[in-house]
Image (cartoon, grey):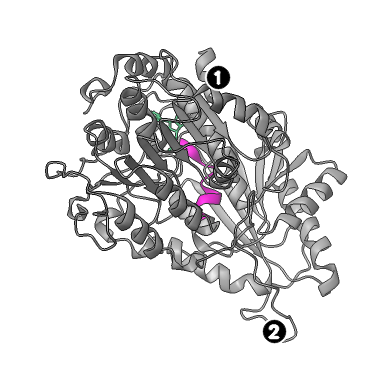
Amino acid sequence: MTKFSDLNLDPKVLKAIVDTGYESPTPIQAGAIPPALEGRDILGIAQTGTGKTAAFTMPMISMLRRGRARARMPRSLVLCPTRELAAQVAENFDAYAKYTKLTKALLIGGVSFKEQDMLIDKGVDVLIATPGRLLDHFERGKLILSDVKIMVVDEADRMLDMGFIPDIERIFGLTPFTRQTFFFSATMAPEIERITNTFLSNPARIEVARAATTGENIAQSVVMFRGSRKDREGTEKRALLRALIESEGENCRNGIIFCNRKVDVDVVAKSMKKHGLDAAPIHGDLDQSHRTRTLQEFRDGTLRFLVASDVAARGLDVPNVSHVFNFDVPSHAEDYVHRIGRTGRAGKTGTAMMICVPRDEKNLEDVERLVQNKIPRLDNPKGGNAPAATTAPAAAPQAPAPQSGERTEEPKKRTRSRSRSKPVTDAPKADVVAAKPDVVAEKPVQKQPETPVAKPAEAPAEQPKQQGGRGRGSDNNNRSTNARATGLGNDAPDFIAMSFEERRKG
Ligand code: AMP
């Protein structure tokens, strides 16, 4: 089994790793760190939960140890689609860089420009940003990107969903062509493929299998529900949600309730509170300090229910979630896997319940096709409601197509439809091994994944990056070297379940 000490990381990073308690690198780390340290571009196909953040922060820190930042000229740049993910990257950076003198700044919406300007003026080694905020700073003349040596694009597929790709392309253009690029995406939609062909040079491609199906340790069910009258559907659906929660009794320690639309997130949270349930909303329209506080309360266990949109909750490392309630069937089947993966971690059992109204039946079919299973139907605990017909009656008009969850912060015009994302099931079978990368640990077993380690692409010797040579369609890309690997799966150790704060406190 590969050890961290085999990876050529800087001794100060290794020392910090000891403090985290990690026993050995995850497959994406074992695969990406060596070529990254050799100066190669990295194309990581991995989703959250696989240890991918450390896979790029650890080599970055090791490489940036030599050299110093100049005023307004960051030496590296990490782009994340949401504020929460950017904050998580910053936490990773703090944890692994704690024995170094490297500095960082976090450029996200909801935080005053003045504070951020001051940090940038001093000079930072690592700039972690959402694309919109970064460009705002750039346009105000406060930021020079010509000294960026390493650029990371994290969760590129989510960037695509949120319409950030034009911003990303622009930012690529503002950085020197000699930069080293680390690019991470859970899926390789054609648009993502195009970007990687254009901006990455002979990348080492490391692929970590993703969850094509959902965990067997998660008890899943769906209640088919039709409101007694169209104008009562919302109220009755919220009452049904409460009934589902009640029916779980004490088993339901806590839970995340997912809604497709931000407006419903607010309404559902408000209604739950009104009915005595301890709930708070989280979505992109809420200010940053509010979102951070709510999440922290949920992590701490002082808040029982988090009502969330997909974007706000995606990728968050929240352990110990006993229940997930899908107030709506997600309009993109892949989100179902992400949503329910918030529970049932590390081999523990979890429960995922969903409400399906007639107009969502098509989405339900898509979900069941994706997970290759029929989700068991549950009787309405309130009784009385006849199961919805298989097809929506003509009288039930289609609701306006939900906007794939929401727009979130710094919304941009969506440029490509999400349906272009390569469905999970399209992934070559060989890449889909028994991993549940999005379903990371909850507790005990200080055990490392026993899974095969991803091999870094057996790359030909690095070819010099040529100006203009990153042309679209360039066949430089080393795509034939996919490594087969798994994510942390159920074997992830317990410290994954802790926040960095907890881990630091030890
Ligand atoms: P990420 O995929 O970056 O969101 O990471 C998911 C979780 O895995 C985080 O809580 C990390 O702290 C944890 N993690 C990262 N690397 C390792 C490792 N080598 N061993 C165990 N846990 C890890």
Q: Amino acid at mark 2?
A: Pro
Question: Is 210 situated above or below 363?
Answer: above
Check disc 1 and report its element: helix, strand or loop. helix
Image-quarter location of ligand 1: top left
Residue located beneath label 1 in the image: 502
Q: Position of residue 104 (x, y in %)?
A: 50, 25
Q: Please provide the residue range marked out in magenta.
A: 336-346
Q: Are marks 1 and 2 in contact (CB under 8 Å)?
A: no
Label 1 or label 2, whichever comes before in sequence order: 2
Could you tell whether 245 is left or right of 147 in the image? right
Query: Which mark is nearer the camera, 1 or 2?
Result: 1
Mark 2, Cα crowd under 10 Å, few <14 / some 14-19 / many 20+, is: few
Could you tell whether 424 is left or right of 273 in the image? left
| Residue closest to the far front | 141
Residue located beneath label 2 in the image: 393
Q: Which mark is residue 438?
A: none
**Magenta-highlighted stretch: main secondary structure?**
helix
